[in-house]
Image: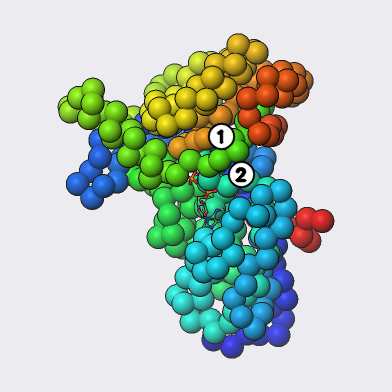
Amino acid sequence: MTVAPTLPGAVTVRAPAKVNLELRVGPRRPDGYHDLATVFQAVSLHDEISVTRWDEWQVVPTGTYAALIPTDGDNLAVRAAKLVAEQWDVDEKLSIRIDKDIPVAGGMAGGSADAAAALLACDQLWGLGLMRDELAELAATLGSDVPFPLTGGNAMGSGRGDQLAPVLARGTFHWVFAISDVGLSTPAVYAECDRLRDLTGSATDMPEPQVSPELMGALRSGDPVALGAALHNDLEPAAFSLRPDLKELRDAGVEFGALGGIVSGSGPTVAFLTESHEASLDLSVSLAAADLCRDLRRAKGPVHGAHVVGAPRT
Ligand code: ATP
């Protein structure tokens, strides 16, 4: 493909982190995957991806967690950009600047957000005019958590979590995220979940995973107290088994007044829902004083999915 001279020289896209409000995990399938029923909420921790034409592929990490991401072809943003180039026959290489503000390996789908952002940025840079469903299809080939950050808001995920359906919701929710020093590997947490289920025999005759009516009702009414009570994560026992300190952290946050506390996805980030912005400030202060985690971040949700922004964050 030849590039028209009117196309932009650089594009910056911002994409959000997610928290799983509910994560129900079905039994291990013969292919090793698990069917999921989950509800995602996009929250206001963002990565920014800027793409520029370059004479070789390169990743330039910046921001809070810059030191923790791969800078070679394993980076999910590079994989996403190369996939677009290959599918649409674009003979160009890119410099990809990643301003990393989403915790890495924290169960907040930061790598997936970067991949989603890179898909949209390449579409804009190369003037491909892709439809949202074409982008979502590409996203699903990169990973089951990649379609959601394109959409943002609140969404229900089924299959491997990649088949999204909109969720009726109102209101804004206020979160505190307690960030760990060390990440947890998603495959290791699923393996521990299977091991614990085998030990207890609970995997046999397990029903199809389904999102609870209580959680959907809480979102529909925008009621944070009801949502706090309905938060649920089937991976939590596995995350607690691998990292008992996370249970201590969750229990402390709830004791300090959170409406609910839950391991985010496969962890180790623990997400606390609070009543208001002020309550999230108070909870952050109490958790910081207890010294049970490396870092605390406040955020609100839901927020929009991946979108083009004017200029890179400075
Ligand atoms: P999920 O919630 O989807 O399970 P996560 O939030 O636990 O994901 P990520 O931050 O996406 O985890 O990182 C998982 C691994 O992916 C990291 O250990 C890292 O080496 C690799 N990775 C590749 N590209 C990126 C990227 N752009 N940002 C972060 N991690 C990346």
- Quadrant assignment for the C terminus: bottom right
The mark nearer the N terminus, 1 or 2, is 2
- Counting from the top left corner in percent of width and height, residue 313 is at 78, 55
Residue at horizontal 66%, vertical 42%?
45
Answer whether residue 86 is visible to the viewer in this image: yes
Q: Can you name the residue that lies furthest to the left here?
A: 205
Query: Compared with residue 184, is residue 245 higher up or lower down, i.e. above or below?
Result: above
Question: Does label 1 point to a residue whose CB lies under 8 Å from ligand 1?
Answer: yes
Q: Position of residue 188 (x, y in %)?
A: 38, 42
Residue in the picture at 61% in, 18% down? 253
Q: Position of residue 66 (x, y in %)?
A: 67, 55
Seen in the picture, residue 285 relative to 181 is either above or below; the reply is above
Asked if residue 57 lies left or right of residue 210, the reply is right
Kindly tell me whether residue 302 is visible in this rendering.
Answer: no
Q: Is residue 161 left or right of residue 207?
A: right
Q: Quadrant of the N terminus?
A: bottom right
Q: Is mark 2 within 8 Å of ligand 1?
A: yes
Between 176 and 212, the residue placed more toward the observer is 176
Which sits in the foreground, 165 or 290?
290
The disc placed on residue 103 is 2
Residue beneath disc 1:
269
Report if the CB atoms under discs 1 and 2 are less than 8 Å apart.
Answer: yes
* Identity, as a three-letter code, of the amino acid under mark 2: Pro
